[in-house]
Image (cartoon, helix red, strand yellow):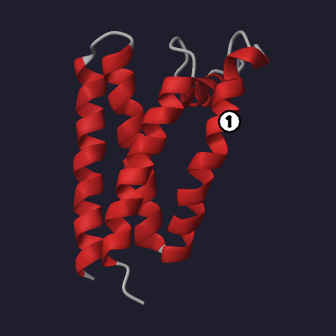
């Protein structure tokens, strides 16, 4: 079966999924930064910490509603194979960090990370389409 256009559709869907996920998470929370900080504090500094400082389920209900929408393209990317999974992850991270860089306050380093994910995702998608 030929999946050439499926990679492009998957890439666009994962970018939209990343945008939606970042939009629904409260603006003062960065999930990936929080997880990295938690692992650093736990493993390196050996201090007690939490992933999300003040957890209120009402803040994350909309995020839990968006999660099944993102799981559809994720399952499809696993079916396509390793390049589908790479396309999904890079697109999701590009959308997530793109909205993170622009939404709360403009941040050049976060925008550079978003553009990097966007360009690597585009290259992975083009490579996967030509295979």
- Between 29 and 23, which is closer to the camera in this rendering? 23
Total numbered circles: 1
Q: Secondary structure at mark 1?
A: helix
* Apparent side of residue 59 relative to residue 111 in the rendered image (left or right): right
- Between 43 and 60, which is closer to the camera in this rendering? 60
- Between 78 and 40, which is closer to the camera in this rendering? 78
Q: Where 39 falls versus 29 (above or below)?
A: below
Residue beneath the point at 39% across and 11% down: 104
Quadrant showing the C terminus:
bottom left
Residue extending furthest toward the bottom: 1
Check disc 1: other Cα within 10 Å, few if <14, some if 14-19, many if 20+: few
Residue beneath the point at 49% across and 25% down: 23
* Apparent side of residue 20 relative to residue 5 in the rendered image (left or right): right
State the image coordinates of residue 86 (x, y, percent, origin top left).
42, 61
Residue beneath the point at 39% across and 23% down: 100
State the image coordinates of residue 4 (x, y, percent, origin top left).
31, 77
Please name the residue that numbered disc 1 is placed on: 65
Q: Where 31 falls versus 104 (above or below)?
A: below
Quadrant showing the N terminus:
bottom left
């Amino acid at each position: 079966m030929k999946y050439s256009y499926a990679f492009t559709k998957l890439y666009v869907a994962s970018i939209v999924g990343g945008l939606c996920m970042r939009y629904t998470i409260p603006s003062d929370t960065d999930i990936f930064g929080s997880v990295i900080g938690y692992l650093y504090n736990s493993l390196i500094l050996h201090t007690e910490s939490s992933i999300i400082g003040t957890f209120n389920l009402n803040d994350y209900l909309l995020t839990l509603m968006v999660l099944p929408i993102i799981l559809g393209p994720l399952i499809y990317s696993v079916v396509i194979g390793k390049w589908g999974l790479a396309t999904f992850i890079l697109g999701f991270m590009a959308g997530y960090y793109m909205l993170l860089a622009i939404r709360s306050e403009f941040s050049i380093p976060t925008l550079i990370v978003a553009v990097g994910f966007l360009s690597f995702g585009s290259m992975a998608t083009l490579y996967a389409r030509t295979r």
